[in-house]
Amino acid sequence: MRTAMSALGGPCNFVSQKGTYSFAGPRRILAATISFEGKTAAVPFSVSSFTPPLREQDWSDDSVIELTFEKDETAR
C-alpha cells in the first residue's frame, strides 16, 4: 500500500488531487455561482452545502462565490 501511494505522489498529493471539499451554508441554498472577470458558472450545491471548484485552474483565487439562500420568514 505504501509503495502504491508513493507511486501516486504520496497520500497528501493523492487526496488533494482527487478530493473535493464542501462547505455548509447557514440556511437552505437555492443557487450557487462562481464569477471572475465576467466569467460565471454554476457551483454544485445540495440543500445547505456547496462544493466550490478549488482544484480547477480555470478560476483565480480572487473569484467570488455567490450563494442565494431561501428566505427566512421569521427574520424581519
Image: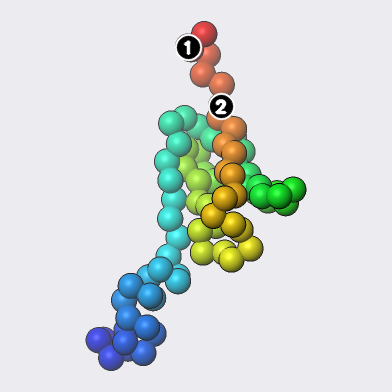
Residue on which the image places disc 2? 70
Q: How far apart, in angstroms, are the residues tagged by discs 2 and 1? A: 12 Å
46 in relation to 14, above or below: above
Measuring from the top left, give residue 49's x and y in whole percent. Answer: 47, 43
Measuring from the top left, give residue 18's x and y in whole percent. Answer: 45, 70
Q: In this view, does 10 lie to the left or right of 75?
A: left
**Secondary-structure class at tag 1:** loop
Measuring from the top left, give residue 34's x and y in whole percent. Answer: 62, 47
Say which residue appears at 42% left-offset and 41% top-offset: 24
Say which residue appears at 57% left-offset and 64% top-offset: 56
Q: In this view, does 69 lie to the left or right of 40?
A: left
Res 2 → quadrant: bottom left
Say which residue appears at 47% left-offset and 30% top-offset: 27
If the image is split into quadrants, where does the N terminus sit? bottom left
Q: For the view shown, which residue lies furthest in the top direction? A: 76
41 in relation to 16, above or below: above
Say which residue appears at 59% left-offset and 49% top-offset: 63
Front residue of 64/15: it is 64
Residue type at the position of mark 2: Glu
Residue 48, numbered circle: none
Measuring from the top left, give residue 35's x and y in whole percent. Answer: 66, 47
Residue 74, numbered circle: 1
Question: How many marks on residues?
Answer: 2
Front residue of 46/67: it is 67
Tell me if mark 2 has few (under 14), some (14-19) or many (20+) residues whose alpha carbon lies within 10 angstroms of its own. Answer: few
Residue type at the position of mark 1: Thr
